[in-house]
Amino acid sequence: MNTTHAGNPATQTQLEIGGRTLKVETGHVAQQASGAVTVRMGDTMLLVTAVMSSAPREGIDFFPLTCDYEEKLYAAGKIPGGFIRREGRPSEQAILNSRLIDRPIRPLFPKDFRNDVQVVATVLSVDQDADPATMAINGASLALSISSIPFQGPIGAVRIGMLDDQLVVGPPVNKMEESKLDL
């Protein structure tokens, strides 16, 4: 039996969303994180981790939560060429996706909680079918829920589109330009 660093068994589960299967695994990677999950739908896969500082930060009157959505060029099969082979700054879409993760989870922490918490969603592979942003939100909720971080969740997220005058749950990313609705 595989166990995580906290002694909890490694788990694997799946859920049907919009006619596709969302698979979630815990306990296999990032075992030094407070909580870590891999989320997969089709060929899109993310690693989402959550960590917390051991002590509250002194002298602040806000909750120090950092949410990072990291797009790696290799996830789409692109390797930077030339002299500079670094990923560079986050794209505008990565910044917006970080905010999409932050907004629903921030109110679910205790009001006076002052420990640093960092949630990182790393896109490991991507296809043009599954939406990695909603997968990152769900992964963040799951990583926080299985950790010892005082999170009063979970939450869930889906993307809704309108294709051919029909509401579609989890529409393919490559069809969203045709959609009359993006919710």
Image: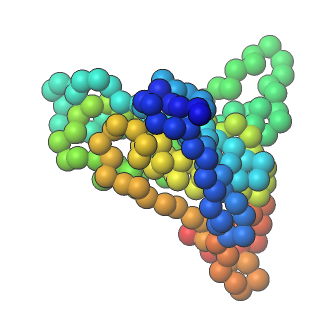
As drawn, the residue found furthest toward the bottom would be 165
Q: Residue at x 61, y 52 (%)?
A: 13
As drawn, the residue found furthest toward the top would be 83
Of residue 179 and residue 67, the one placed in the foreground of this image is 67
Q: Residue at x 58, y 32 (%)?
A: 2
Q: Is residue 109 above or below residue 120?
A: below
Question: Is 133 placed left or right of 53 in the picture?
Answer: right
Measured as percent of width and height from the top left, residue 40 is found at 68, 48
From the image, which quarter does the C terminus lie in? bottom right
**Could you tell me how many numbered marks the image carries?**
0
Measured as percent of width and height from the top left, residue 142 is found at 48, 48
Measured as percent of width and height from the top left, residue 155 is found at 43, 58
Q: Residue at x 53, y 31 (%)?
A: 3
| Colouring | rainbow
From the image, which quarter does the N terminus lie in? top right
Question: Is 58 placed left or right of 23 in the picture?
Answer: left
Of residue 5 and residue 119, the one placed in the foreground of this image is 5
